[in-house]
Structure formats: C-alpha cells, structure tokens
Image (cartoon, grey):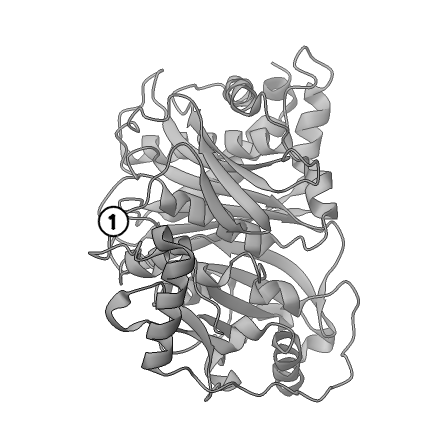
Amino acid sequence: MADRLTSLDTSFLYMEDRSTVMHVGEVMVFDPPDGRLDHERLMTLFSQRIAHLPRYRQKVRWVPGNLANPVWVDDETFDLSYHVRRAALPKPGNDAQLEDFVARVQPRPLDRGRPLWEAYIVEGLEHGRFAIVTKTHHALVDGAHPLDIGQVLVTDTPGWEKPTQDLWRPRHAPSDLSLLGSAVVDSVKGPRALVRSVRGGSQELVDFGGRVLSGVGSLVSTVARGAARPAPTSPLNAHVGQARRFVMVGTDLAAYRQVRRRLSKGPHADDVSINDIVLACIAGALRSWLLTRGSPVHSTTVVRALVPVSVEDDTGQGLHQLAACLVDLPVGEPAASMRLHQIAFLTRQQIAGGRAVGADRLVGLAGFAPPTLHAMGARLGSDMSKRLFNLIVTNVPGPQFSLYAGDARLLATYPVIPLAKGQALAIGLTSYDGGVYYGLNADRDAMPDIEVLGQGIADALAELADTGDAGA
C-alpha cells in the first residue's frame, strides 16, 4: 500500500503558490583537485546515493475528490538528468554571479508531476571551484525519510566509491479506484483523520499549544509566552513577489569564539552562547540597514525574530523537540555589547525550563544534517502566523571537519530559507569546518539593498570582536 502524506505535509502543498514556494535550499561550494570537475562521476554519485532513498524517486499522487491526503507513488519515468541539471557561470564566475544564479532558480516552484527535488551542478566558478545548488520540498522532509539530497551527497572521506548496480524498479501506480478504496479503509480505521485538507490554498495551520512536526524523530513546536502579541511594524514585512535576491556571507568561527572567551572573564560568563553572538550580529546589521534606509530607529526599536531552538525531550535522546523562540532583537541599542547581553537574557528566559541541545551534542547526533534541520525551522516558520514575527533565523551547527563529494572538498555551505507570506527576509546559517556561513534570502523588490545587510553582519561581528566594545 502506498505511503500517505501527513496532514502537515499536505498543508504545505496547499499553502504553496508561485510567490511563496515551500522548499528549502542549500548552496554548497566545492574545490575539486586541480580545478577539474568530473561531471559523469558526480552524476553517478547522485544515482548511488538516492538508491538508498526511495522517496527521491517518488511523486505525489492526489486522491480523487481529495477524500484523503495524497500518497507517495513511484515515478515510473524517473529521469535523474531532469533532477540534476548542469549550469555554468560566465567569466569571472565570482560569488556575486553565483548569488544571482541562486536568486533566479530558487524561487521557481518544483514540478508537482515529478519527485519534489532538484539539484544544479554549477561550473565556472573562479579559482577552479564548482557549486551544487539544491532544492528540497518540505513534504520530502518527513519522519520516515528526514534527509536532504545535499546531505547524502557528502562524506568525511575523499574519493569515489565503486559503482554498484541499481536494483530499483518502480512499482505500478495505483488506480483511482484503488486510491479511493484505501481512503475508505483509512477513514474506517481513523475517522477523525479523514479529510483534514486545507482548502483555498493559503490558509495557515496554527496550533499554539503544540504542533507535531515530522523530521529527525518528532519535532514539536511550542510558542513562548506572550507570543500572541503582534510583531512590531517593520519594512521586513512587505508584499512578497516571485523574484528574489540572495546574498552569501562567510565569517570565521574563531571570531565568535574569541568574543565568547573575552566575555567569559566578565559577570556574564555562562550567559552568552555562540547563537547569542550570531543574533547580536544580525541585530547590528539590521540597525545599520535601517539607518542607511533613513528608517526611524529609536532606543526602543526592535525586530522580532523567530529562532527555532532544539531541546531535549523527556527520554534524554536529544533533538526531538523544536522550541519556537521569539526574540526581540534590540536594534535600537547603539552599543554592540549591550545588544548581545540583552539578546542572551531574552533567549535564556525563553528556553528556561527546557533543556536546550548544545552545539557539540547536535553535531554528534546520528543522522545530523544541517539542510534537514534548516528545513524543520522553515516548516515551523511557515506554520505560524506571519503577524507573530518579522523574520525567521535558523542556525544549525555543522561538523568542524572537511566533507567531500567524491574527491572535491566542500569549502562552504549556505542555506536558502524560503520566504513566508508577508516576510521579505529569511536568514539561515550553518557553521562548518571553522566557518560560519549565512544565506540571506530576500524579496527582490522589497529589499533591493540586501547587500547592505550582508556587509552589516561582517561589520557587527568585527565590532563585537573589538576589545574595547566587547569588554564593555
């Protein structure tokens, strides 16, 4: 019998439209030996890896009359070359050109008649590099198969695997009569689960008491106290069109650790985390961006960020719950150190009573996957009312050692978080192998000056790292 999509996964299909797509992306930049890309071997690697992921060769089949949630069926005409596409940048192939490429391809909806993922092998980057740009629909990141295509592509050992025979054979798709019959059977087994479809295509599912999300184990989102307060007015909340701008910001993880070490000598020694420093950098960048725009910034001006935080569940296994922290970033505060301490206090308040999973614990978890966890955060953001926050920030720690796709070393990885309705900006970041990499995804018309915000993040980190300010 075909697997049925959960009500939550189905809701993302209903909520999606051309201006608010429901897929998460990743930009992975690689350095091949001698600057040579072996495209044929890379395609073979894709084929080998998805051989262990049947979902990546399945598509969504709707039940006639929408009498039940749709099901996953094998794509009998699956074509790897349709999903893994080849592209190239013109000379000089710099990062700005790669950002433009990502901004063009990421907002395009995935083909609903095929498996819901795509990958682009982008050649022609300067210094002999290439990039892999992925797109994975939220409906794919479910409890049974919580893997992103970018995750399964890389390993911690360089070198090409020996080709193996692909034994996958598609099963014949069920008939409409069979789908109707299984829907009736499911309704008898669980009548309350019958027809919980979201009609109209844009209604958001909101459950502030607790929402079961599918992903790495069971992810349960909760909204902090006071979340019912509407978000402050901000230019970040605007009409979202189809066009995007994307900016990549690479920073040094050592700089964040330096700030934390310096603060460890003061009265707030145990109160500041790397995540707090990240949010302080974003707050400083938002302040600079607003001032550059001529927007009014007062001492009480804040920007509310939804920050998904992983917490322990009752079993102590780790990473089974996703807490929805709503943090009012104090962009009106001119002193970088004060912004940092205010943010640390706010986040500490919200996760008190739970058991937050530390970065080291996250990295060591079996099945850890930065793209997957970014997708979980984006799902959480899409599931909440847009009136609750101004932007979403997902921060996922990654491994502090090199990863490889074949013999090509992964240099950097930038998340691409989708925009929700009325949200002009989404920020994802991943730490990896000594770096912290931000992906800023923005509406093209609402934020034509997104580069100012990107530069502001680097400037805010430098300001915090300054001895005089950080020690204040």
Q: Residue furthest left?
A: 200
Please state the horizontal and vertical placement of residue 89, each as a whole percent of the image.
48, 74
Q: Secondary structure at mark 1?
A: loop
For residue 34, what is the image quadrant? bottom right
Tell me if residue 87 can be seen: no
Count of labels in the image: 1
Please state the horizontal and vertical placement of residue 36, each as a whole percent of the image.
67, 80
Which residue matches tag 1? 203
Q: Is residue 102 left or right of residue 168?
A: left
Tell me if residue 388 can be seen: yes
- Toward the viewer: 197 or 425? 197
Query: Where 288 falls versus 199 (above or below)?
Result: above
For residue 178, what is the image quadrant? bottom left
Q: Is residue 390 left or right of residue 412?
A: left
Query: What residue type is disc 1 on?
Result: Gln
Query: Where 347 falls versus 62 (above or below)?
Result: above
The crowding category of the residue bearing disc 1, from other C-alpha atoms within 10 Å (few below 14, some 14 to 19, many at least 20), is few
Tell me what residue is drawn at x 71 percent, y 46 percent.
Answer: 363
Query: Where 93 falls versus 247 (above or below)?
Result: below
